[in-house]
């Protein structure tokens, strides 16, 4: 047998398909897995001891806002420390390209979550991809283009649906971006820059997405009282637009909607056997986004995650601040703005039911530029494995790993990723199943998780023994490199 560059010996392999663990050695040559099995006779440049550990495909974070973080913090410890090797960016309708805003101007929320000034934006999607190629991060990046970004680029007034001329401007920007390599198109109809877009406007754009062989993901118009209408609208957009759709961070918000995940999942099941539809979730009862003083209902508690006006208020409870200032919740939010919040608005039973659904993938939705981020940024994947799988027993380790590897790789058509088999890319994570757990909390949100021993991206070790190795072996994955699943799930 040819000499391997690296050999991982004696780990329990969790191959990403959901199949039971099995003990094997794994040999790596260049950026690929060369062999899996009893490789005791095979020579290797270096050997990594896997005894007593689980070796899984690197985790795929299907819902991120890491667009700028992968450039500004290429070591990307918040994700690599969890075993994540690929991030899908450009979610919730916001991407850094194609848009230009003066350097001293603040882009409209929620785009300011990833671009606090115009200086962070890129005129063309190809420019963004070129920046990734020039300075690759430690993780692979699958980039989407955001609908709200297109609206900001093409429309003079966002308080209405796009005119014919604006729609054709958006279409040509979208087509150029897809041609440059954007892999998907995201919408954030919940948010102010897109809430006045008609379903027809979105369908017209998604038609171009489907024709290009890309995918659509959506932060739906409503995740509360009208969540079923939103699922219906999402299905219509996917069906009429002819593109596979991912429902992002599925949840039922507001006390009156607690327990309704039985209903929403049944609705999604109804559609997903008729058209390609997928979903993702993060393992927490709180969400996080911009703090909008007119949108504070439905949350039993709100923590301030950052504030431009009052940076000292980050980490504080909004109600405590309101009491101190003698103001209402919304007056306080207005005073802190621009700002972000962490909103406790979900029911634990819904979180568990959604996570346990066989079609649910894992996406952190972490916000990497927040002063006091939601702990999901540093904790999502170890929390699913350590808390929900091992401690709560919600699903097996093999099923948990599939939700973060084989399942998303199939949905997004990430060729030769999300699997441990000869020929697959050597995106790997070695962890201790007995001790893996999230360490990030609401009080102390930027703590690396426990139990992650080693992380490899495209055959290079990027994280070992709790620290970055400095390797930046991630790649920008373009539309031409993927083949998204464009058929319904079997009934
Ligand atoms: Zn969102
Ligand atoms: Cu998001």
Image: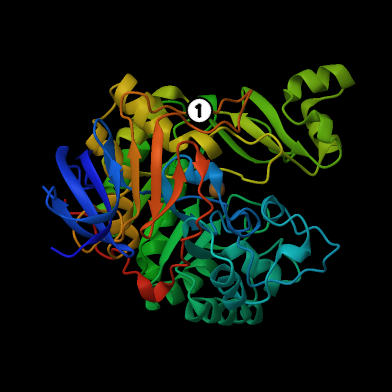
Q: Give the farthest residue toward the right.
A: 325
Name which quarter of the figure residue 50 lies in.
top left
Q: Could you say where residue 156 lies in the image, as x and y percent from the top left?
A: 76, 71
When the figure is inspected, residue 206 is found, relative to residue 80, above or below; the finding is below
Task: Determine whether the residue tagged by mark 1 lies in a helix, strand or loop.
Answer: loop
113 horizontally vs 275: left or right: right
Q: Quadrant of the N terminus?
A: bottom left
The answer to whether residue 273 is seen in the rendering is yes
145 horizontally vs 464: left or right: right
When the figure is inspected, residue 116 is found, relative to residue 311, above or below; the finding is below
Q: Could you say where residue 236 lies in the image, as x and y percent from the top left?
A: 39, 60
Q: Residues within 10 Å of mark 1 (few under 14, many from 20)?
A: some
Residue in the foreground of this view, choosing between 304 and 33: 33
Q: Could you say where residue 413 lies in the image, as x and y percent from the top left?
A: 31, 64
Residue in the foreground of this view, choosing between 54 and 470: 470
Q: Could you say where residue 37 lies in the image, as x and y percent from the top left?
A: 12, 49
The answer to whether residue 61 is seen in the rendering is no
Residue visible at 75% across and 67% down in the picture: 157
When the figure is inspected, residue 478 is found, relative to residue 372, above or below; the finding is below
When the figure is inspected, residue 455 is found, relative to residue 166, above or below; the finding is above
**Residue denoted by label 1:** 285
Residue visible at 49% across and 34% down in the picture: 379
State the count of labels: 1
């Amino acid at each position: 047998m040819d000499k391997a560059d690296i050999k991982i010996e004696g780990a329990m392999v969790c191959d990403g398909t959901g199949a039971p663990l099995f003990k094997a050695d794994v040999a790596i040559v260049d950026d690929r897995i060369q062999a899996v099995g009893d490789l005791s006779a095979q020579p290797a440049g270096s050997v990594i001891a896997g005894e007593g550990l689980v070796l899984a495909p690197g985790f795929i974070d299907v819902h991120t806002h890491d667009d700028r973080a992968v450039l500004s913090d290429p070591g990307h410890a918040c994700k690599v420390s969890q075993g994540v090797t690929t991030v899908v960016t450009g979610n919730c309708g916001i991407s850094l390209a194609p848009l230009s805003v003066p350097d001293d101007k603040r882009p409209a929320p929620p785009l300011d979550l990833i671009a606090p000034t115009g200086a962070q934006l890129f005129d063309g999607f190809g420019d963004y991809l070129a920046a990734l190629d020039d300075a690759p991060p430690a993780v692979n990046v699958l980039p989407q283009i955001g609908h709200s970004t297109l609206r900001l680029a093409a429309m003079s007034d966002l308080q209405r649906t796009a005119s014919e001329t604006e729609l054709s401007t958006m279409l040509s920007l979208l087509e150029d971006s897809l041609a440059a390599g954007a892999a998907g198109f995201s919408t954030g109809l919940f948010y102010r820059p897109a809430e006045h877009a008609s379903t027809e406007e979105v369908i017209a754009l998604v038609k171009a997405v489907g024709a290009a062989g890309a995918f659509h993901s959506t932060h739906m118009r409503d995740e509360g009282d009208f969540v079923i209408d939103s699922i219906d609208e999402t299905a219509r957009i996917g069906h009429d637009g002819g593109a596979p759709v991912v429902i992002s961070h599925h949840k039922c918000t507001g006390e009156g909607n607690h327990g309704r995940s039985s209903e929403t999942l049944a609705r999604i099941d109804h559609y997903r056997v008729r058209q390609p539809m997928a979903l993702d979730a993060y393992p927490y009862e709180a969400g996080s986004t911009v703090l909008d003083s007119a949108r504070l209902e439905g949350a039993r508690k709100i923590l301030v995650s950052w504030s431009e006006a009052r940076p000292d208020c980050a980490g504080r409870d909004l109600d405590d601040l309101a009491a101190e200032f003698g103001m209402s919740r919304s007056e306080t939010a207005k005073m802190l703005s621009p700002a972000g919040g962490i909103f406790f608005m979900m029911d634990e039973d819904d979180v568990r039911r959604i996570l346990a659904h066989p079609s649910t993938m894992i996406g952190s939705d972490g916000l990497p530029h927040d002063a006091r981020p939601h702990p999901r940024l540093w904790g999502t994947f170890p929390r699913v494995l350590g808390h929900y799988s091992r401690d709560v027993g919600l699903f097996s380790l093999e099923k948990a790993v599939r939700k973060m590897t084989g399942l998303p790789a199939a949905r997004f058509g990430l060729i030769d990723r999300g699997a441990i088999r000869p020929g697959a890319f050597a995106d790997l994570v070695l962890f201790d199943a007995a001790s893996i757990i999230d360490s990030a909390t609401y009080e102390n949100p930027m703590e690396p998780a426990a139990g992650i021993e080693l992380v490899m991206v495209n055959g290079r070790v990027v994280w070992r023994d709790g620290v970055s190795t400095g390797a930046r072996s991630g790649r920008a994955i373009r539309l031409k490199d993927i083949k998204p699943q464009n058929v319904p799930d079997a009934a």
